[in-house]
Amino acid sequence: MSTTATDTAPATPAETGQGSKFSFGVLQFPGSNSDQDCVNAIEVLGHEAHYVWHKDDQLGHLDAVLVPGGFSYGDYLRAGAIARFSPVMQSLAEFANNGGWVLGICNGFQILCEAGLLPGALIRNRSLQFRSEFVHLATVNHGTPFTRAIPEGALMRVPVAHGEGCYFADETTLSEMEANGQILWQYATADGKVEDHANPNGSVRHIAGICNANKNVAALMPHPERACQGLIGSDDGQWIFRSLIEHMSAKA
Amino acid sequence: MSEPKITPELIRQHNLTDEEYQLILEQIGREPNMTELGIFSVMWSEHCSYKNTRPLLKGFPTRTPKVLVPAGEENAGIIDIGDGLAVAFKIESHNHPSAVEPFQGATTGVGGIIRDIFTMGARPICAVNSLRFGKLDSAEVRRLFRGVVAGIGHYGNCFGIPTVAGEVYFDECYEGNPLVNAFCLGVLRHEQIARGAAKGVGNPVFYVGPATGRDGLAGAAFASQDLTEESAEQQRGAVQVGDPFMEKLCMEACLELLATGAVAGIQDMGAAGLTCSTCETAARGGTGIEIELDKVPQRGPGMSPYEIMLSESQERMLIIVHKGREDEVKRIFDKWDLPWAEIGHVTDTGQMVVKHHGEIVADLPAAKLADEAPIYHREAAEPAYLKETRAFDLNSIPDTEDPVTDLNALMAWPTIASKNWVYRQYDYTVRNGTIVHPGSDAAVVRVKADSLPLLPDDAPNRNEPVSEKYLAMSVDGNGSYVYLDPYEGGKIAVAEAARNLACSGAVPLGTTDNLNFGNPHNPELFWQLKEAVRGLADACSHFEAPVTGGNVSLYNQNPKGAIDPTPTVAMVGLIEDPAHITTQWFKNEGDLILLLGDPVDKGDVFQGLGGSAYLKVKHQLKKGLPPRCDLSKEKSLHDALRGWIAQGVVHSAHDCSEGGLAVALAESCISREKARHTSELIGADIHLKEVPGSRLDALLFGEIQGRIVISISPVYLGKVLGQAEILGLPVEQIGTVGGQRLSIKVGERSFEWGLESLHDSWFNTIDRMMQD
């Protein structure tokens, strides 16, 4: 057995924010369906979360924004392709360009790629089927606001649930991303090997999640927000949110 | 517009008999026009009226003090779960559409049942399904199976509801007539229960949701006739197309609107669309309703009143709003960018009046249409085949010489094999509530604050904390048992569901059932139905799990004959304490393995092998009588198990069903799935006593009812055995958990299985069969 995040017991919610509560925005598109799960996860960690409606062109005062999973606009045309034209995406782009922290999950990853806030694209799973299962994630770069609290060598056990989660980018982009430390998470086996067997969608270089060059916008296909309480199967997902909280506390 | 003249042929095309047409003439005192004939035909179809089954369904227990809305009153029943919270749940079939167009047939089945739940004011929080297909070695069966699973997944995944449990059987009797039964459960506060009644004369009637098209014309009538190749081909247009995105928006908007208090009544447009929703709401409200079809959003020009009234376009709702609060509908549905239209109002005439271009095109008594369909007491006769199946002599087949091969074959038999190929296509983690995922005896989900529908802004309890609740659910139904003995088989379906709940630590709250049977005009098939319902009713009473609603699907036939009579029983239970949630797999080296229940049933000449998986797999026989189900014994066993679970003694509990004790033991060793390609395997050492007169195959693979395999820490052995003795329950230590092998010794003989290969054949069989 490898070490997973749970083996080093996560701090209680009260400990995580070092006293100060951060305010997270959770975007709501028509068809978002993991928006409640994001709010739930943030509340479990002892912080505040607010929904931001897709027609709003103001984000208001927020410390970070989560772009949740779901099937925004029914995922018609192409996953995330319509959502990027929502009024709220304009404000999100400004927020991100001003250095605001943004984390996209599942459909949120697709939307951020469609909006050009992240490189690459997500295409249909190579199995051509939806995949819902727990996977193990290896963290590639521990030096980002989204990964800094994840213990070295720890694997995170979190669920995936997607039909179009196969990350793709051309070789030049991938090499650039690798050089910049933008590849954050890869699919791994239970003993930490990054290989085909572990990859639920066939993504290039077994990529599960990435960030932009500035390291303030990140996204991943798995659902850390659905893995923040042992009762529902795993609390390993907490490490990603705790990284961001730790980083924001250090900046504050 | 010229309407066709009503001819005897037209009446027959509408599946109405001459007698039924006479009754229509008496009820309305004149000849109906074409639109009215269409309305009668769908309202008096079996699907909407239960005209062949109503007398039987009266036998179901429907009330306990916890039942807040009983069966038959509304779209779904509602049960109290304490602390002011309640659950609404129901199962419904979409068999015929799925036979014709598996993907869309299945999606709209899921969509329909979700609508039934949020119509009650509840937020849907999980889905379950029960499926039957022909044998997987047929390419056509694989096509249907692939399409149905993808359809269920597509709808649930996009809508954002976790599909948390299910069952799939493969048997040749379902070839060409698959069964697709979809279940949904929602939660709400007591004060949030919504009613499907058109209350308040003068109140406006709203249509919300996407426009009406010609799809699904008269689907209810299609579902109420024999399924033949010809009917399937002709009725392709009766299959609707589902849009889960639209339904998600529609649900959010409806729950938001319900929270305003502006709604007087709400009803989904399911089977028989606008027809059913208007006349049922008027009938429930004791009122009349008048609508103008010109105002109904339509997908194309030139739709006739007949088509608009009978269309089964999906994701549409009918909402009756308190007069003066129309703006709230507009505000909320505009916010969600959903079409809405005010199409009429509530009247005091008792009539359902439909206008088109200002002219009356239907004027019918609402209550008569909804509640006074003819009732038939069909003839029942014991089927002739039973003489032959009962006459089966177990001694005509040799006892097994090679249990190792037999168990391998059973584990790889698609009905028993792991269904991970299915559930890995279903999102089961969305909503952050799933505690026990697919793959254990029962699924367990939690109810938390965000599971509930919105409260009004000024609600006094808006900021009160919600105490978490833990719900378990299981769906079961072995058609072979019911075929061989409908009464006993009916009991077993309920007993198995209750047993699965007990294994998870839950106390049953209630039941919903889907009766999938053949043509009721055939006395032998009707006898199956009658006897099975009697068995279901007796067992539901016994487990204090009242039937809160369900569905009847008759006319399930393929060219070779009727399907095995298949009631599917979904039971919902409550777990008091999260610490009591129990799963089926062995966990700790050194734990002791106990068998609760009898190793053999001396009163059964078939020794538990009648109708068993073993007989089918090894001897290609569906014969004998199914194992006997002693409801009192079964209930005491469940109570005792829950007691031990509550005392913290039980580490795992798994019921013995298809494949008997050997399969239950093997599954306890290999069914713990931690992540993708990461299963935790743990061995077991089993010693079974030889029983004089008992066959080895019966001991290992007999499906004697009322049995559960549990594992406990050794320190509790004395306590459990002592309490079992006081309770008079048969409990025996049969082995120990540990090692990397399953080893079973019977007397002097010893059999062994490697866990890796056992797991591989069980886990990967369906995936391998679907690689084409």
Image (tube, helix red, strand yellow):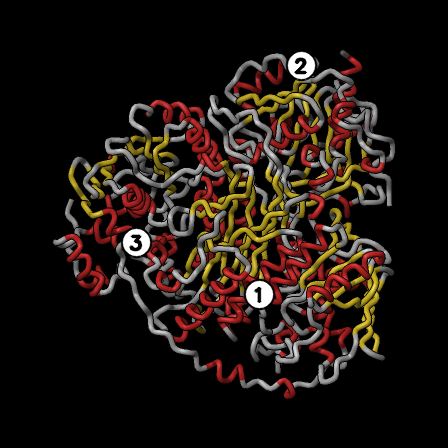
- Chain bearing mark 1: B
* In this view, the mark in front (2 or 3): 3
**Identity of the residue furthest to the bottom in this view:** B396
Vertical placement of B499 versus B361: above or below? Answer: below
Residue wearing tag 3: B42
**Label 2, residues with CA under 10 Å away: few <14, some 14-19, many ≥20:** some
Residue wearing tag 1: B170
Mark 2–mark 3 contact, CB under 8 Å? Answer: no
**Side (left or right) of B240 relative to B496:** left
Location of residue B108 in the rendering, given as x and y in whole percent from the top left corner: 45, 48
The alpha-carbon separation of the residues under discs 2 and 3 comes to 59 Å
In which quadrant of the rendered view does residue B406 lie? bottom right
Which sits in the foreground, A208 or B45?
B45
* In this view, the mark in front (3 or 1): 3
Q: Amino acid at mark 1?
A: Phe
**Side (left or right) of B192 relative to B691:** left
The local secondary structure at tag 3 comes to helix
Location of residue B737 in the rendering, given as x and y in whole percent from the top left corner: 83, 60
Q: Amino acid at mark 3?
A: Val
Vertical placement of A152 versus B605: above or below? Answer: above
Residue wearing tag 2: A97
**Label 3, residues with CA under 10 Å away: few <14, some 14-19, many ≥20:** many
The alpha-carbon separation of the residues under discs 3 and 1 comes to 32 Å
Asked if marks 2 and 3 fall on the same chain, the answer is no
- Residue at 58%, 59% (x, y): give it: B497
Q: Amino acid at mark 2?
A: Asn
The label shown at residue A135 is: none
Q: Is residue B540 visible?
A: yes
Location of residue B630 in the rendering, given as x and y in whole percent from the top left corner: 58, 70
